Amino acid sequence: MEQLDYDVIIVGSGLAGLRTAIEILRRDNGRLGIKVALISKLYLMRSHSVSAEGGTSAVLYPEEGDSFELYAWDTIKGSDFLADQDAVWRFVHLATQEIRLIERWGVPWNRREDGRIEQRWFGGLSFPRATYAQDKTGFFEMRTLYDTLLKYDNWDRFDEHFVTSLVLDGNKFVGFNTIDLKTGNMRFFRGKAGIIATGGNGQMYRITSTASSSTGDGYGIAYNAGIPLKDMEFVQFHPTGLVPKGLLITEAARGEGAYLKNADGERFMKKYAPSKMELAPRDIVSRSIMTEIREGRGVKDEATGIQHVWLDMTHLGKEKIEQKLPFIREMGFKYVGIDIVNEPMPVRPTTHYEMGGINTDIDGKVQSLSGPIKGLWAAGEAACVSIQGSNRLGSNGTNECLVYGYIVGNDVYNYILKENPPMPNIPAGKLEQEQDRIFSGILGKESGGEDVYQIKDELKDTMEKYVHVYRTAEELETAVKKVKELKNRYKDIRLTDRGHTFNYNLQHALELGFLLDQAEITAFGALMRTESRGAHARLDYPKRDDEHWLKHTLAVKGADGPSFSYIPVRITMWKPVARVY
Amino acid sequence: MTRVRILRNDGSKQWWQEYDVEPRKGSTVLDLLLNIRETHDHTLAFRHSCQMGSCGSCGMVINGKPSLACQTRIADLKSEPLFNDTIRIEPLYSYPVIKDLVVDLDDFVNKHKSIKPYIIRKNPEELEEAPMEFRVTPAENLNFIQFDYCIMCGLCVAACPTVSLDPQFTGPQALAQAYRYIADPRDEGFNERQSILDTSHGVWRCHFAGSCSYVCPKGVDPAKAIQLLKREILKRKFVRGKAGASVAVVVQPEKSISNAPKAPPLDFKMEADQHE
């Protein structure tokens, strides 16, 4: 197998991966000559961060009443008190410089008349601090970071390399096994430091706003290497997914004044969050929509039978929509054939974000049950620090990528500068073992008759039906059982495509393996957590239970499924109180 | 049933293959391709990701026109006057084909890189620390934001007749991006880019066929950007004193009064600058 050595290897080329790469290269500026490899299973610039729409929160206008305390409070209350407060405190301070730095690098933020950066309202905020560039904020941030990275020389891009496993030597990072999709050959990347920035896993679900690339690969390789995944039962359902597929309709639509209406034309949020209305946090709005649908006040989509509510922007006027929500209008035209200036949009909750992730400390260093993994970091949605707790506020995802790109980039740089670590030794047999697993165990396997896409289909239906916004023990048990059955059938898959060049059949099989594990962890973790908190709403345990459950879940791979343990939440600013909006 | 004809390629030969599939109401070409791959033929190779016209992965030639598969609805294809009951899909023109609809984008991304697509300042320190933002008015934003919509899907290059004749031509995508940065009031890098753009394979090779703008799925209008770029180069060469966009200045915040709510008092005492 071909082997490549780099000082730093970053897996994932979304906002977190790009920001980390830039931070390392600009801090180094040729001093140590740190060589970075940036690996993506897509082409660079295709990562799902481009689909982030509404905004990136930061305190820019303290003179107008915003403050770090207020931002921290909004985030912590929004998280239903599961966020680690020391991490949030640091995070809210660093967001400001990120907004201004990427402004200088080219992000076309919307501006006030006097040329200063404009901000707008988002759900769960006490001050309009969502900084935005039209309704394509993540896209413009990606463009800017990608272009800025092109200034630097000391990095190599490895587009379309699929990472199959993480190699550790005890509690030390060694490297990543990958398949070069273009040739079908395996390549091993060895490095002094590794960063996992692979995003989330929304593809477990049928109706999702996530790209087909969001298959939890980073979670998968970490979990298979014995690293705990934290708080995976907290899956965010974005309230406004466009029917039927669940494409993202930004929260900024409601930030700009859009209404949610049921079949009777009633603004139903007045029953659930009378002060914040449509701008309550996402978990609350998603539950409200599902309650309306369950109680018979939903609208049935004629073509698909999917139940939904209406997102009404017709009172906003054409000018405001063109200036602030042009992409949403384009999506209306292209995907449902309506003009949102004149007609409401059919929406329902859609799987959007994984609050959980790879267990890290406040610096993004990956933590196993027996202490830190030396030389390994995680950032962005792939990581769980935890900033987002049990419910992420809208406009807090892109800035976690930026802030943690900065933090991790610096931490990695300091690690190499101060410790001058040697290239690690590769444990004997590890690479051959992986090559056998992929080529003989999956690609060349002649036995078995199960189909990758059939299993994936059933997985999506299972999660959509039984591990959704509202959950019960009975449904979650059904899901765990079904996923176990699918995992068994997965052992019998057989590929039709036996080729080497762009064998997507093989890639999808490997992704499915990751997703099946994560579905099991999600459903099982949700079954264990006998309370309702943030995005995890149990009909049979409708109250938050701080006495027993103010703690993070850790799932570690066992012989027969995940084994769970729990660690405390760091409460350094505010004690939990009732969460009312 | 809808018949889909796909020009396939295994690296050594190419052939047309036909599939019959049933589109649902609102289906896109990407939906049909996914359906084909998942239920008819697992070996069919094509790129896709976000499914909402943002990532630029699924560029291909559909019924003769370079298009994004995720944004091309079957119903719209069927309503075209020359539609003859078959959807014809080919890999993007002017790119080397690797497998089926997957093409080699290396030359494309290298050309983008060649025009120095990033903010250049005379004092590079200004890009390393940012205590405050540059002042850019909404009107100044409008000078370049349209050209910043580029998702690097490569359709414009596939449609460009000049690219197909002159492989060294910088191409509509990269030239439009050069203009995006030059028109940005924060940028001071015109001179550094001029030697790349002001050449016979640069802006002057474009003869304004306009097909790039016709196929652009994001309304970037590269043809317009290239004409503006030509004008900018001529202006800076021959009209002294009128050159260039205004350079952005760092803002000074103004004091004002607030009635925003306050966070509740802290339950725990924090050390000053605990984590700053």
Image: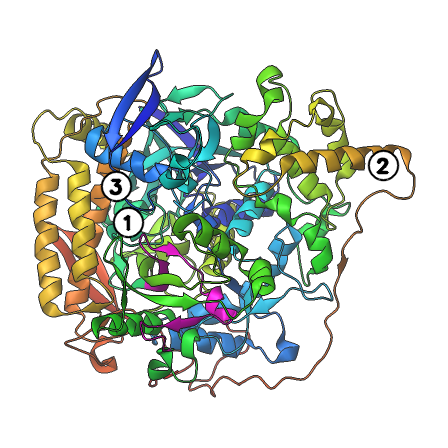
Q: In x, y percent, where is residue A150? A: 59, 38
Q: Residue furthest right?
A: B240
Q: Quadrant of the N terminus of chain A?
A: top left
Residue nearest the viewer, comparing A349 with A70: A349
Residues beneath discs 1 and 2 located on the same chain: no
For disc 2, the marked residue is B236
Q: Residue at x 88, y 44 (%)?
A: B242
Q: Residues within 10 Å of mark 3 (few under 14, many from 20)?
A: many
Q: Position of residue A4 (x, y in %)?
A: 40, 28
Whether residue A263 is in magenta: the answer is yes
User: Are the two marked residues, 1 and 2, in contact with CB atoms closer than 8 angstroms?
Assistant: no
- Closer to the camera in the image, A373 or B230: B230
Q: Residue A501's quadrant in the figure?
A: top left
For the point 50% across and 35% down, the residue is B153
Q: Position of residue B111 (x, y in %)?
A: 60, 28
Q: Chain of mark 3?
A: A
Provide the secondary structure element on which disc 2 rests: helix
**Rendered image quadrant of residue A166:** top left
Classify A153 as above or below B10.
Answer: below
Q: Which residue is mark 3?
A: A511
In the rendered structure, find residue A203 and report the number of the disc placed on it. 1
Secondary structure under the numbered disc 3 in the rendered image: helix
* Chain letter for mark 1: A
Position of A190 with respect to A120 (left or right) is left
Q: Nearer the viewer, residue B184 or B143?
A: B143
Q: Quadrant of residue A241?
A: bottom left
**What kind of colouring is applied to the model shown?**
rainbow
Q: Position of residue A107 (x, y in %)?
A: 61, 52
Magenta residue span: A237-266
Circles 1 and 3, Cβ within 8 Å, touching? The answer is yes
